[in-house]
């Protein structure tokens, strides 16, 4: 009888534990604060990694206090910085103040809190990467160079205005080693001594003082024109007649391929093809073709098919 009673008690005691074990439900695991970061010393965000949810719906709450106050506050914005994060705007950020931050996970069975994170906003500054990096080859005094331009990083608070310092790095596509150039506060840079006919990769990054460097921007690639390359395709941009008796056409040259380049305009009339006798050249200024009054070419209808030929001028 005594043995049966002990067995019954054991069954009663173990039954709730067995039920919990079978259901896989328990209080949540301990969350971990993985990073806090400020883009510009006026706002900041913190992110955490959840622990196990104990098999139950689990809520996460970030609490913080300031070293000069006893009051405990809750995160003001769980949305702006993405999942498992808290964003502190200007109204909730105090420079030179230490924040004591914890994250608490809660479900039906219980709760668990992270280790505290102590944050001074001025010590966690890392701006975003510069954006809108563009590359262009230019020529000055017959010397080819690369012109790079970019914009400051995007901010969650668009009204903020900060002075960033920039670095640019460049390398040939097939090389591993980068050359880094200190740019200062300018958002543009002229790069000389590049090899014609070679493709280069360029990135930029920035920093606020004090603070860490941002991540490098997205890569941009560019081919430096070779001295032996043909000129690029020109574009006819406009044809105009002021009085139906004469007309003028203008075009925009492409890159010259690194050499002096001549431009020739060819045209034909409706019903005829291009031939040497159809070529009429009377240049009134650079990149302009004009048909004079009384010319036999002003009689008849001209079809809208024109060719501008760019040819490299060869020195004799």
Image (cartoon, helix red, strand yellow):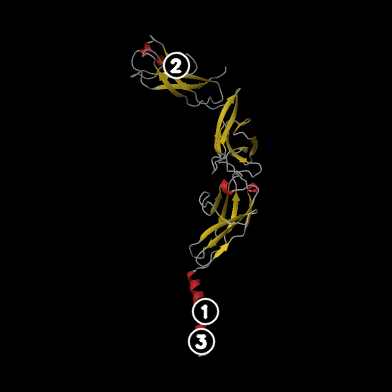
Q: Secondary structure at mark 1?
A: helix
Location of residue 124 with respect to 113 vertically, above or below: above
Quarter-wise, where is residue 113 in the image?
bottom right
Q: Secondary structure at mark 3?
A: helix
- Mark before the other along the chain sequence, 3 or 1: 3
Left or right of 162, for residue 83: left
- Check contact, mark 1 vs mark 2: CB within 8 A: no
**Toward the viewer: 41 or 268?**
41
Mark 1 neighbour class, 10 Å CA radius: few under 14, some 14 to 19, many 20 or more: few
**Toward the viewer: 213 or 266?**
213
Q: Position of residue 254 (x, y in %)?
A: 50, 25
Please give the name of the residue rendered at 52% of the width and 81% of the height, measured from the top-left corner: 10
Q: Can you tell which mark lies on residue 5? A: 3
| Residue annotated with mark 1 | 13
Q: Position of residue 99 (x, y in %)?
A: 62, 53
- Mark before the other along the chain sequence, 1 or 2: 1
**Toward the viewer: 193 or 116?**
116
Q: Position of residue 159 (x, y in %)?
A: 55, 40
Left or right of 99, for residue 9: left
């Amino acid at each position: 009888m005594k043995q049966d009673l002990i067995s019954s008690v054991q069954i009663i005691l173990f039954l709730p534990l067995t039920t919990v074990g079978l259901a896989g439900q328990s209080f949540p695991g301990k969350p971990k604060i993985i990073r806090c970061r400020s883009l510009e010393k006026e706002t900041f965000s913190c992110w955490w990694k959840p622990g196990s949810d104990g098999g139950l719906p689990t809520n996460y709450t970030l609490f913080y206090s300031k070293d000069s106050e006893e009051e405990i506050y809750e995160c003001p914005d769980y949305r702006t910085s993405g999942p498992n994060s808290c964003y502190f705007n200007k109204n909730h950020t105090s420079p030179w103040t230490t924040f004591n931050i914890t994250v608490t996970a809660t479900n039906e069975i219980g709760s668990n809190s992270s280790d505290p994170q102590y944050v001074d906003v001025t010590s966690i500054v890392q701006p975003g990467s510069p954006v809108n990096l563009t590359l262009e080859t230019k020529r000055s005094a017959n010397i080819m160079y690369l012109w790079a331009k970019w914009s400051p990083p995007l901010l969650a608070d668009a009204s903020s205005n900060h002075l960033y310092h920039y670095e640019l790095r460049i390398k040939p596509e097939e090389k591993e080693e980068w050359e880094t150039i200190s740019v200062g506060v300018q958002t543009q840079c002229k790069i000389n001594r590049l090899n014609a006919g070679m493709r280069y990769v360029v990135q930029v990054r920035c920093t606020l003082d004090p603070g860490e460097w941002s991540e490098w921007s997205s890569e941009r690639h560019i081919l430096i024109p070779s001295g032996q390359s043909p000129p690029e395709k020109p574009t006819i941009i406009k044809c105009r007649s002021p009085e139906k008796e004469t007309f003028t056409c203008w075009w925009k040259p492409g890159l010259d391929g690194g050499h002096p380049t001549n431009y020739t305009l060819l045209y034909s009339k409706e019903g005829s093809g291009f031939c040497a006798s159809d070529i009429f050249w009377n240049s009134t200024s650079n990149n302009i073709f004009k048909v004079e009054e009384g010319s036999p070419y002003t009689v008849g209808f001209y079809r809208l098919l024109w060719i501008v030929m760019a040819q490299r001028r060869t020195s004799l």
